[in-house]
Amino acid sequence: MKLAIIFGARSFEHEISIVSAIALKKVLQCELTYIFCDNERNFYLIPTDQITSKRFSSGEYKKDKSLYLKNGGFFYKKMIGEELLNIDCVLNLIHGADGEDGKMSALFDFFGIPYIGPRLEASCISYNKLFTKLFAKEVGVNTLSYQLLLKESPEPIMIDFPMIIKPLRLGSSIGISIVKDKSELSYALDVAFEFDNAVLVEPFIKGIKEYNLAGAYSKEGFLFSIIEEPHKEEFLDFDKKYLDFSRTKRVNEAILPLAIQENIKNAFVKLYNPLFQGALIRCDFFVLDECVYLNEINPIPGSMANYLFDDFEKVIRSLSTSLPKSVEMPEQHYRYIHSIQSAKGK
């Protein structure tokens, strides 16, 4: 399999995406091609054997071969004409805006490029924390209570202290604050509103158990990872997640009663199928009084959560052969227009 990994783009999580892409080089044994999207949304073909973080921070990547999108794939110019980049499938590894908000999936669908990643509708729902909550409720998955605040017209907060404040459309714990009392509230809101004009307020429950489960659906059925209990303090801040996204070593499985494990997997299936077909996602759950609640959906997990799988490459290969097909459009004969023209005698 010739797999292209696309990463970078115009996002607050640009650097996280670079770290994830480099991490996968250590994990995947298939033939890899790296496509970098810079902050100006230009595409570059990065030599696989020369991919380092410094290449991007120094701007050295601008010397690499430029790529552009056309129907059927990525192309590059030759001395005479152009050539199609020889790949079988693209793996969307752009975290945050451009990658998880649906822009990249829309481009791939528009140009007919096979890709692993969330489709447009899945991206729109999982990128917006409010939409995620509403979707979870619709499919029968519990969520903690929440309140939406708008920057232009903030309402009185009805959630009790302590609370957690999150920008509505951002990941990697950027802009998130735990607010323990009223004296911390104004600053936390200012931080969150720096990144988004809407924020979500949720209760912060100290000591609540959190568990992560990744997976995908292929022709073989659901391919689940282990269930992980992340070790953290109050929550994973940006710096901890930056390191977390570079993980390549398998982590230990959480010790949980079988009934709770099954409830977590059942919740995952409800959230995944059929909206996220074609993607490998990670869902983060809370367990409170033996009841499972969705925390968030990660449609493009850091380094694709490879550290949760026994055989990550097998999952990617299986998923690449099980991608959803777009509806084939019949040949356009313009019968309706011709009939109107005939009726008018034209």
Image (cartoon, rainbow, N blue to C red):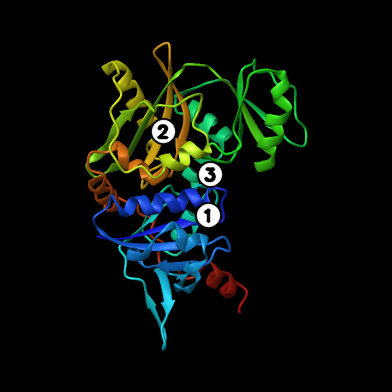
Q: Secondary structure at mark 1?
A: helix
| Quarter of the image where one finds residue 178 | top right
- In this rendering, is residue 43 above or below 288? below
- Residue nearer the viewer, 113 or 199: 199
Query: In whole angstroms, how far apart are the C-alphas of marks 3 and 1?
Result: 10 Å
Residue 275 makes an appearance in the image: no
Image side of residue 309 versus residue 169, left or right: left
Q: Secondary structure at mark 3?
A: helix
- Which quarter of the figure is the N terminus placed in? bottom left
Q: Which mark is residue 103?
A: 1
Image side of residue 106 versus residue 82, left or right: right
Extreme residue in the bottom direction? 80
Image side of residue 91 versus residue 167, left or right: left
The residue at which mark 3 appears reads as 124
- In this rendering, is residue 256 above or below 317? above
Residue occupying the point 61% across, 78% down: 345
Query: Which kind of residue does numbered mark 2 sit on?
Result: Cys
Q: Which mark is residue 283?
A: 2
- In this rendering, is residue 61 above or below 20? below
Horizontal and vertical percent position of residue 60: 48, 68
- Residue nearer the viewer, 241 or 298: 241
